[in-house]
Amino acid sequence: MPFKEIKFKDLFFDPKVQKFCVSEKFQCPNYNHSWACPPAAPYLEEEVSKFTKFFLVYTKFNMIEYIRRQKRKYPNRSEKRIRNNLYYKTDIREDLEKEVKLFFEDFDGQYKENLILWGGHCLVCEKQGYKNCSYDDEKPCRYPEKIRYSMEAVGIHVTNMVKALDLDIEWPPINYYYRFALIALR
């Protein structure tokens, strides 16, 4: 199970990160459509600083093998299209969920509270059978105790953090893609 214990100081908090989700060149389709995404997502530096242990859990996705499989299955599909994360993001997110679950199976239970920040938007409502987050219906979050904020949504600059950590990963990702989760314990 790939994870690394890190310190709070290893987290690169910056309120400007929350604006990465919307700019002149890019707007995430989840921006302003989820309680877990900006502009609704809170900046959590102060809240996260109250935790005492931090673990970066990650999963490694072999893009080269994935491209080979997709080329066999769809010979006319371009590599650029295959690399589009719309096609593989579900697989890599499920892998990350498995890694987080494994982390907690090995967890000894000495901490009473945890906070999990994910890579990507919250899927709790979708997994419960809803078509979308209650945000668009102007109703409160259906599952506030299960909401899954992404690290970027709460102000963590994941790329800068990963670059600064001594991880055995390819960065920037070309042959292998990674999905990260932060587990904070107290």
Image (tube, grey):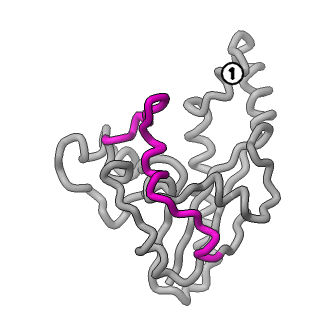
Identity of the residue drawn at 23% across and 40% down: 136
Q: Nearer the viewer, residue 183 or 18?
A: 18
Residue linked to disc 1:
80
What's drawn in magenta, residue-wise? 7-32
Question: Taken as a whole, is the magenta stretch helix, strand or loop?
Answer: loop
Identity of the residue drawn at 31% across and 42% down: 32
Q: Nearer the viewer, residue 68 or 16?
A: 16
Q: Amino acid at mark 1?
A: Lys
Q: Quadrant of residue 78?
A: top right
Give the vertical position of 116 relative to 24 (above or below): below
Q: Position of residue 186 (x, y in %)?
A: 50, 84
Examine the structure image and report whether residue 51 is included in the region drawn in magenta.
no
Q: Quadrant of residue 45?
A: bottom left
Identity of the residue drawn at 33% across and 67% down: 145
Identity of the residue drawn at 56% across and 55% down: 157
Q: Nearer the viewer, residue 177 or 65?
A: 177
Q: Nearer the viewer, residue 128 or 87?
A: 87
